Amino acid sequence: MDWKTFQALLSGVNKYSTAFGRIWLSVVFVFRVMVYVVAAERVWGDEQKDFDCNTKQPGCANVCYDHFFPISHIRLWALQLIFVTCPSFMVVMHVAYRDDRERRYRAKHGDSNCKLYNNVGKKHGGLWWTYLISLFVKTGIEFSFLYILHYIYDSFYLPRLVKCNVAPCPNLVDCYIGHPTEKKVFTYFMVGASCLCIILNICEIIYLISKRFVRIAKKINRGHRNMNVHQNDYNKDPFNNNKETMLRRDLKDQPPSFRSAFKSSHRVSGLKMEEKIRASAPNLSVS
C-alpha cells in the first residue's frame, strides 16, 4: 500500500473540508494511519508463527488459526482505511468537474472575468449534497467495519488461550495467541479512533444541515423585510395619488342623482329670477 500517494490524495480533500472535516483528517492520519504503519504492522507481522498449539498433529495449528482468525485485524483495518477515505474523493472529483465546467465556460465566452461559479470549492448546490452524502457513507462504513470486527471475533477482547476441537485436531487442543496484551491494546485503540471519527462525522452532518437551515431562514426573513419595505414606501409616497384618482374616476363615472340635479337647477333658476328682478326694479337712488 503506497501511503504517500494516499496522503497526497487526502491532502486535496483538506482544502474543501469544514473545521470538523479537517479534525477528522488529522485523526485519520495521526491516530490511525501513523499507528498502523509504525506499530500495528510489526505487532501483527508474523502472527501465525506465534500462534502455538499443544499438539504436533499436522494441519491442526493452521486450521485452528483460520478458525479463530478468519481475517487478520491488520488487514481488516487496512480495508477500513481505504473504504473510509474513498467517499472523500467524491468531493475532489466534484470540484474537478466544476473546474472543467468553469474552464469551458470561459473559453466559450472569451472573457476571463466571466464566471460560472463564484468559488468552485464553496459548498453550495450539488457540491453540498455530494459532501453530505460522503459523510453519510463514511459513517456507514465505520459502523459496518466495527460490526464486522465484533461479529468475527465475538468481541473486541483478545484472550490469551483459545480451545480448538476442529478436525484434523485429535481432541480439544489448547492454542496460545502471541502478544495478546499488546494486540488487545492496539485493538482497543483502533476501535476508539474509529468511534471518534464517527462522532466527528455526525457533528459535521449536524453542522452542515443546521447551517443550511439558518441560511434558508435568513433568505425568507430578507424576503419578508423587502416586501414590508416596498409596501411601506408605497403607502408613504407623497406622489402616490392612485387612491384619489380612482375616487375621482368613480365620481365621474357615476350618474348624478335626482336631488343633486334638482338642487343645481333650482340654484340656476333662482339666480336668473334675481337677475330679472334687479333689472326690472327702478333705480330710486338720488343722485
Image (spheres, rainbow, N blue to C red):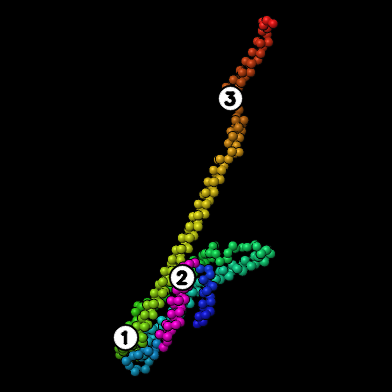
The residue carrying mark 1 is 161
- The x, y position of residue 13, in whole percent, is 52, 71
Quadrant location, the C terminus: top right
Please state the extent of the stretch shown in magenta in the rendering. 18-46
Earlier sequence position, callout 1 versus callout 3 = 1
* Left or right of residue 84: residue 236: right
Q: Quadrant of residue 247?
A: top right
Decide if residue 163 is in sight here.
Answer: yes
Write the residue at 58% across / 70% down: 96
Mark 1 lies on a secondary structure that is strand
Q: Tell me whether the residue at label 1 lies in contact with that at label 3, contact meaning CB atoms closer than 8 angstroms.
A: no
- The x, y position of residue 114, in whole percent, is 65, 62
The residue carrying mark 2 is 23
Foreground mark, 1 or 2, reads 2
- Asked if residue 137 is among those painted magenta in the image, a careful observer would answer no
* Amino acid type, mark 3: Ser
Decide if residue 136 is in sight here.
Answer: no
The residue carrying mark 3 is 257
Q: Nearer the viewer, residue 255 or 205?
A: 205
Write the residue at 43% across / 84% down: 41
* Amino acid type, mark 1: Leu
* Amino acid type, mark 2: Ile
Distance from label 3 to label 2 (Cα)? 84 Å
Foreground mark, 1 or 3, reads 1
Q: Residues within 10 Å of mark 2 (few under 14, many from 20)?
A: some
Q: Nearer the viewer, residue 248 or 22?
A: 22
Write the residue at 61% across / 17% down: 266
85 w.r.t. 69: above or below:
above
